[in-house]
Amino acid sequence: MPALDLDSAWDLHPQVSVRPEPFGALLYHFGTRKLSFLKDRTLLSVVQSLAAAPTVRAACLTAGVPEADLPQYQRALTTLASSSMVIERAS
Amino acid sequence: MTLLDARPDSLTGTKQSFGRSAPPATTGPTKPGRLVDLFELGLDSPICLTWELTYACNLSCVHCLSSSGRRDPNELTTAEAKGVIDELERMQVFYVNIGGGEPTVRPDFWELVDYASEHHVGVKFSTNGVKISPEIAQRLVKSDYVDVQISLDGATADVNDHVRGPGSFDTAMRAMQNLFDAGFENFKISVVCTRQNIPQLDEFKAIADRYKAQLRLTRLRPSGRGADVWDDLHPLPEQQKQLYDWLVAHGDNVLTGDSFFHLSAYGDALPGLNLCGAGRVVCLIDPVGDVYACPFAIHEEFLAGNVRSEGGFQEVWRHSELFGRLRNPQTGGACTSCQFFDSCRGGCMAAKFFTGLPLDGPDPECVRGFGEEALTKRKEADSIPKPDGDHSHSTVRGSRRDGKPVTKARPVSLTLSLRRPDAPPVSACEIDPLAGFRP
């Protein structure tokens, strides 16, 4: 799967439920019945910021991700996209 | 019985770091440490839990973990069960694995399933298929929140019915056909691996493929009535290796409920958390509301509390003394010096407990054979803990090869008492309407 475009708009899948935990969060997709773990709270903030942000890049910056760390978050979100936890927003 | 089947398929924010892989780098968005180490300390809410709705069952499987058969008069009422669902919703427990007994024989079963769905608690229920009619299958296929798991312990009627009882193979196959015809894809077929069915693994996979279902293999535990048959049914050492190789070859396509982590000592860790989740990420609620550390440990030693007590399930999960104790890093005990401890982590607590082995020693099915050694040295057989509670039918199928029922002769307790009347009995011919009345 190609890396997700930082300048596109994404949302959490409507069938995904998020449960914050001290180490990060658990994500559960009721459609695919798959579970994912977010291993840090910043990534959780990014995921939670997606819906209100015009782009993934904006969501990352809102969540306080330093510019230099963007590639790592891009990779993480690409992984989430590959299991349909996040989906591209129809424009 | 189900533990963790939802695979942590994306451990996001880092590379996969389960099992024996190196801890992720501390730079970037990743905290040091493996997820399994974090889980050892427990979570605010279980990832999933098993909820046995009733002890009532139409079958009498010889290996039943919960010794089910007859309903317990003290089972949670519909209102109490809904209260538990409300609590699970508040705690954001994503889904429950409902079992029994045979859960679908509860008259309010579908009502509770609907209630859970409305409250965003997913349900996967285990059934022998007895109630999965074409109509029910049609109804199930419409729900996002409901998943079905059919129990099947043999790929052929003879192997299955030996364990699950006459006719049970046909019942399960009919249920699968109904689900398939209704277009329910990816339901689960759950197999408890035994000495007789391990040679049938490929056949099970073929059945699952035929019905567009997913195969799930779990471990035979010496819990409930399973304790009575474990010696005869548990896989032989060479079969364990065969099972491990088969699981490695089929990887993520076959679910295991994380139940074979004791086999990880053969080589690479199997997919899953490879951690005893008891009281940490999973637990069991039994039909009367008792909360146990795991579905395989129905014994007062592993009883954390009851959902009927003040504070309900959440209080038990977060503050019970037992769960607090279980949420400490596992100590290896006799296994500490073993080079494989990091992958098998000493195996299954319940399997050790119900075979009379110490909890900090090897699993009875330790792949290096230390379990068998320990079994030969264990204490007297009559001091092995017995499961608490027995709801077995009073007529059970025994080990008779003809499959005919054998009736267990049991004493019937009667209390005989003699009440001494303080006045002569009123004659049947007395016509006074106040006869025998004493203000």
Image (cartoon, coloured by chain):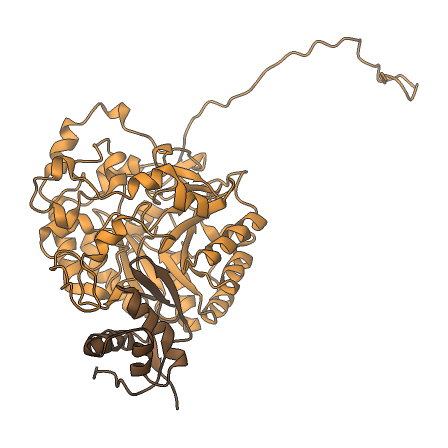
Chain colours: A brown, B orange
User: In what quadrant of the picture does the C terminus of chain A appear?
Assistant: bottom left
Q: Is residue B125 visible?
A: no
Q: Residue at x 51, y 22 (%)?
A: B413
In percent of width and height, residue B257 lies at: 28, 55
In percent of width and height, residue B265 lies at: 11, 49
**Relative depth, front residue between B137 and B406:** B137
Q: Is B215 on the left or on the right of B98, as rendered?
A: left
**Relative depth, front residue between B346 and B161:** B346
**Relative depth, front residue between A21 and B388:** A21
Q: Residue at x 34, y 58 (%)?
A: A21
Residue B102's place in the image compared with B253, above or below, is: above
Q: Is B253 on the left or on the right of B143, as rendered?
A: left
Residue that protrudes farthest toward the bottom in the picture: A91
**Relative depth, front residue between B139 and B156:** B139
Residue that protrudes farthest toward the right in the picture: B432
Residue B98's place in the image compared with B206, above or below, is: above
In percent of width and height, residue B284 lies at: 39, 46
Q: Residue at x 11, y 48 (%)?
A: B238
Q: Is residue B371 visible?
A: yes
Counting every numbered tag in the picture gives 0
Q: Quadrant of residue A58?
A: bottom left
Q: Residue at x 17, y 47 (%)?
A: B262
Q: Is B242 on the left or on the right of B11, as rendered?
A: left
In percent of width and height, residue B97 lies at: 40, 55
User: In what quadrant of the picture does the N terminus of chain A appear?
Assistant: bottom left
Q: Quadrant of residue B93?
A: bottom left
